[in-house]
Image (cartoon, rainbow, N blue to C red):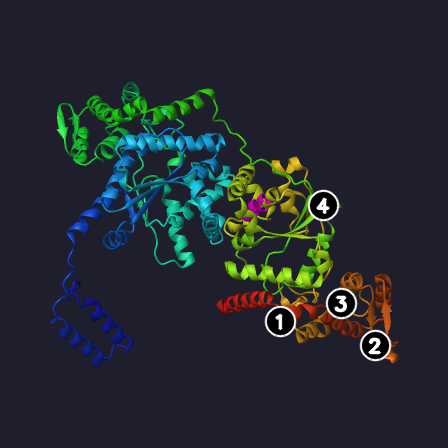
Amino acid sequence: FDPSHVCMRRYQILIRRACHYRFSFNACVVASTRYRGMTDQPAPEAPAVDPEVEKKYNLIRSVGEECLTEKELRNLVEKKPNFRLYDGFEPSGRMHIAQGVFKAMNVNKCTKAGGVFVFWVADWFALMNDKMGGDLEKIKTVGRYLIEVWKATGMDMDRVQFLWSADEINKNAQAYWMQALDVARRFTIARLMKCCQIMGRKEGSLTAAQILYPLMQCTDVFFLKADVCQLGVDQRKVNMLARDYCDAAGRKLKPVILSHHMLYGLKKGQEKMSKSDPDSAIFMEDSAEDVRRKIGQAYCPVKPEVAEAEEEGEGMRLVQDDLKNPCLDYVEHILFSKPDATFTAASTTYTSFADVKEAFLAEKISEEALKEGLITSINELLEPVRQHFQTDDEAKRLLETIKAWKRAGALESVTADVPDKVPEVPVCVVYAPMPKEPGTFFSLANIHLTVQQLQSNPDGSQAVLFIPDWSAFVCNCLNGDEAAIKAAFTCYLAILQVLFGPQMEKVQVRWQSDLILANPNDYWITVINVGRSFTLKQIRTVLGGEDEDAQRVSDVIMPLLHIGDLVALGATSVVASKEDAGLTELSKGFRVLGARGMELKVVDTSLLMLKKDGAANDAECHVSCLDNEMELNSKLKKKAFCEPGNTSYCPPLVLVTELLLPLKGSFLLERKEADGGNREYTDAASMRSDFAAQQLHPGDLKTSLAKYMNALILPVRDHFKKDPTAKKAQADFDKCVKKMAKSKK
C-alpha cells in the first residue's frame, strides 16, 4: 500500500485490531475490505495558506536561529493581533554592535510582523549580578544611555515599550513576587543550576542572590504577558525554564522561544563578545579609528583552525560552524540584517551573504579586502549614533558620565544597603511554625512552644510573633494554596488568643506579606544584598545538605527571606527553636544584623509525642487543639505511651508537669478510694516521684488528664463553632487537607 495515502493510518489501526484477534482470517478480510472502500474516498484538501500570514511568519522567523516551536509561532501570528515579544537587557556598561544594530533590525522585523516589542530594563538584575559596582543609580543611568543608542540606530519606536523592572515590580509587588515564589517552589537547585550561564558566571562561584536571577527572568515572561521570548541563544536555558514551569503549573499556553544568533568576539577563540574586553567587539560609540583598528586586527581565517573556546561560550552555537570567522559573522548578521542590504569588497557588490562567503573561501575576496569593506560598512552604520551623541545634549551627558565613572574607577563593588532603621524599643522576634505537616500544625506542642518562646523575650523588649505566610508558600506548605495558608495561620492565632489571651495582649503580631508589601523596594533590595553576602554553598550547608537533585530552590529562597524579615522588623533579638537556630545564627553574619548586635536565644518544646516510636508527622502522636472530645480521649486514654514507673518517657506526665501545672497551678488526680482516693498535685517533683514509685497508676493519670485537656480545649471548640472568621478559616483549611489527601491516592 502507498504509505502516504490519507487512509493509511486508519488502515493500520484496523490491522492492529486484527492482530488483537490473533490474526483472525475474517478480521484481516474485514480490514482489507474496509481499506479498499476507503481508497475510493477523495483526500481532504489542505487548508488555504494566507499569504499575508505567511509573509509575517517568515519575517519574524528570520530573526531566530532557533524557534520553539514553529507551529506555535505560526499559530500566534495567525490568530493573535499585537502579540507581545520581550527581551530584557541588563544595564551593565557600553553597548556593542550586536546589542545595538543587530537588535534594532530584529526588533523592526518583529514589529513589522505585527508584534509589540517590550524591553525589560533589568536594573534589579544588574544589581544582583554586581554590575556597575552594585550601585542602582549608576545602573539606571546606563539604562537611559542604552535607550538613546537604540533611538539613534533606527529602531522603530512606535511599537516598542521600555519598562523598568524596579518601577514595574514595585507597582505590582504582590503579583510579581508571588509569581516568582511560585516558580521557586516548583524546581530543584539542580534544574536552576542549568541556567547559571545567563549570568556569565561559573556554577561554583555563584552567590545565593544569583539563584534569584533565573527565577526573576522566568517570572518576567509571565509578568509581562509575553507571547514570545526574543532573546539570544545564550538565554535559551532560562527561557526553557519558563516552558518547563508551564508544564509544572499546568499552564496550557507556553511562551514561544525565538533565540537569535550570538556573534563571535573579534579575537581568536572568543565565542561571544565581552564588555569587559574593549577589543572583543565594536561598540556603538566607537570612533572610525577604533573600528579600523579593531577590524584590522580581528581574527579572520579562510580555513578552520583549532581554537580553545572560552568556557562561557558553551552552548552558544546551535548551527555548526567550523570556521568561526568573526568578520564573516559581522557581514552576515550585522550588515545583511538590514532589508535589501548589499556589501562591497574588492570593487564587487554582493547582494547576499552566501555569495560573500563563497567568494572569500574561494579567495576571490582577500582578508584585507573583506576587512576594508567591513570597516566602511560598519562606519556607515555607526555614524548616525556618533552624531547623536555629539549633538544631543542628554545623550552626550549620559555617555560622558559613564566614561567618567570608568576613568575614576567608580565601578568597583559597593555596599548598597538600605539605611538601617532600628526602633527605639528593642524588638524580640518569634517565628510562628509553618504548616508543613497539616495533621500536626495545630498540635499543643506547637502552641506551647510558641508561648514559651514569647515569654522568653528579654526584659524591655517588644515581643513580635511573626507569621511567615510567603515563606510557607515558597516552601510549598499546603501545596502552595494561598487561601489555605492564610486560613492555617488565622486558626493558629485564634487558638493562641483563646488559650493564652492575657499573654497575647502584650504581643505584636506581624504578617510577612504585610511587612513586604509595606515597602517592597527596600525589602527586596535587602534580600538581594543578603544573597550577595552569602555563597550558595553557605546557605545550602546551613540547611543540612548539598544534594542538588533533592534540595528545592525554595530551600535557598526561604533563608534569604528570613534574614530580610529580621532586617525589616528591626529585630534586636530572636527566640528560636533548636531546629531554626542554625538559620538565625547565619542571619547574624549579615552585616546589618551583625552591626545591631542581634542576639539569639534557643527555646525548644518540652512536650513529647504521645507514641514513643511514632513519626513526627503522625497526627495520632500529638494532641491537636482542634481535636473533638472523642479524638482526644482516644489519643490520651488508649494510644499515649505511659509505662508504669517510667519517668524518662511519659507524655501524659509531661503534659501535666510542663503544661497544666504552670497554667492551672494544680492538678487533681481522680481515682477510687480503694486505689488511694483523689490527690491534688501542686508541684511537678512530687508527681514524678509518685509515678516513679508506681504510687500513681498510668490508667488513673490518663483518665484525669483527658478530663483536664478536654476542659482546656473546650473554649477553642466553642470559639470555632461561634466565631465566623475562625469557622471559615477552619473550613478552608480542612478543604485543602482533604484535597491533598485525595491527590495522594
Magenta segment, prevailing SS (helix, strand or loop): helix
The one of 514 and 643 positioned closer to us in this rendering: 514
What is the three-letter code of the residue carrying label 4?
Ser
What is the three-letter code of the residue carrying label 3?
Pro
Foreground label between 1 and 3: 1
Considering the numbered disc 2 on the image, is that residue within a helix, a strand or a loop? loop
Up-down: is 741 above or below 213?
Answer: below
- Snapshot quadrant of residue 541: top right
In whole angstroms, how far apart are the C-alphas of marks 2 and 3? 16 Å
Q: State which tag comes first along the sequence, 3 or 4.
A: 4
Whether label 1 touches label 2, CB < 8 Å: no
Left or right: 569 as drawn, with respect to 701: left
- Snapshot quadrant of residue 45: bottom left
Left or right: 513 as drawn, with respect to 56: right
Q: Circle 1 is placed at which residue position?
A: 721
Q: Which residues are magenta?
A: 556-564
Mark 1 packing: few (<14 Cα in 10 Å), some, or many (20+)? few
In whole angstroms, how far apart are the C-alphas of marks 1 and 2? 33 Å
Which percent across, then down, holds residue 155? Answer: 27, 35
Q: Circle 4 is placed at which residue position?
A: 461
In whole angstroms, how far apart are the C-alphas of marks 4 and 1? 36 Å
Q: State which tag comes first along the sequence, 2 or 4.
A: 4
Mark 2 packing: few (<14 Cα in 10 Å), some, or many (20+)? some
Q: Circle 2 is placed at which residue position?
A: 671
Whether label 4 touches label 1, CB < 8 Å: no
In whole angstroms, how far apart are the C-alphas of marks 3 and 4? 34 Å
Mark 3 packing: few (<14 Cα in 10 Å), some, or many (20+)? many
Indicate whether residue 351 is drawn in magenta.
no
What is the three-letter code of the residue carrying label 2?
Arg
